[in-house]
Amino acid sequence: MNKNLIEKGSLLIAGIGIGLVLLQLLGFSPEKETGDAEYLQYMNDNYKVFSPIAPDELSFAGEAVPLDLTDVKERLDRELLVNTYWHSNTFLLLKRANRWFPVIEPILKENGVPEDFKYLALVESSLTNAISPSGAAGFWQFLDKTGKEFGLEISEQVDQRYHVEKATQAACSYLKDAHRKFGSWSLVAASYNMGMGGVEKQLNRQLATSYWDLLLNEETSRYVFRILAVKEIATNPERYGFHMRSSDLYEPYSTKKIDVSTSIEDLASWASANGTNYKSLKILNPWLRQTSLEVVPGSSYTILLPEEGTL
């Protein structure tokens, strides 16, 4: 018999055994014949799921959310439910936010973009270098064409959609352009999902002036409310059942910067010569897409390395 199969079977049996012990400790014995009524009573006594209580007031980027509107209240409730009970995902969001928000927040501030937009990045990519089916990439999920429009270098060797600082700067440029167009940060957030043209078309078609009054496709209709829900949970985690010690959070990386103005033939050898390894180099610089780096005369790149050793 396959060894891995035996190991998996052993783990499954062990897991079942632990589960049965816990049930017995709670006063429920699987050896007893139980009817539906007794089983339901046991479940009601020992297992409870609560509906999260939405806040009485909520704002996004300084703009009040009209929770007095039935549709708005129920759409927020949906996203609070989803993100409250999607435990593993929400825990990871909170852990990663502790590492990356200190990088994103100063750039938003320098550009005059409300800090709440850090939650947009959290919703877009879960603060991972994700790639969408449409080819959008990085924390801010830029498409190739859009990234280049907003000043990102995107080539076979270098893809700055994966460069957190530069991608955040590009996102700020987009967000400010959208705010000049719409004058509303909630509409700006919606446009990040469906494009400025899409939002403008729906505003004109529906004779509306507010995101909260628009009837949109399912994805964009939920989009801003996902941001609101994640913001609410991240701001008040214990209210929604998320309890973490400071040691549970992912700490920001401790790094040093090295300016490179000449080509690097082999990044692994270069990393080793600089006191680290290829893995650490790539984790800190995911925008380096190949095993080498060609630097055009007169240009340079800043590479991050661990302050000491490896990651």
Image (spheres, rainbow, N blue to C red):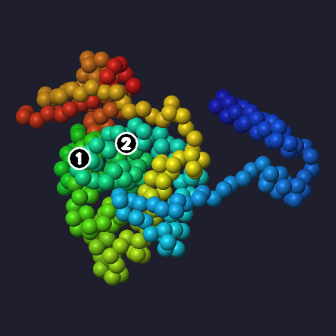
Q: Residue at x 27, y 53 (%)?
A: 113
Which residue is at the front of the view, 282 or 133? 282
Residue type, numbered disc 2: Phe
**Is mark 2 in CB contact (under 8 Å) with mark 1?**
no
Q: Which residue is mark 2?
A: 101
Residue name at image x 92 percent, y 46 percent: 32
Q: Can residue 131 be seen in the rendering of this structure?
A: no
Residue at point 7%, 34% (across, down): 298
In the image as oriented, which residue stretches furthest toward the right?
Answer: 33
The answer to whether residue 137 is above or below residue 261 is below
Work out whether residue 62 can be spotted.
yes
Per the model, the C-alpha gap separating discs 2 and 1 is 14 Å
Q: Earlier in the sequence, mark 2 or mark 1?
A: 2
Q: Quadrant of residue 40?
A: bottom right
Q: Which residue is mark 1?
A: 110
Question: Residue 161's spot in the image, x, y percent?
Answer: 28, 46
Q: Quadrant of the C terminus?
A: top left
Name the quadrant of the N terminus: top right
Is 52 rendered above or below residue 288? below
Residue beneath the point at 23% across and 40% down: 158
Residue 187, given in percent of the width and then of the height, sits at 33, 66
Q: Which mark is residue 215?
A: none
Q: Mark 1: which secondary structure? A: helix
Rendering quarter of residue 211: bottom left
Asked whether, in this view, residue 306 is left or right of residue 221, the answer is: left
Kindly indicate the quadrant of the structure image that contains residue 38. bottom right
Q: Amino acid at mark 1?
A: Glu
Callout in the foreground (2, 1): 1
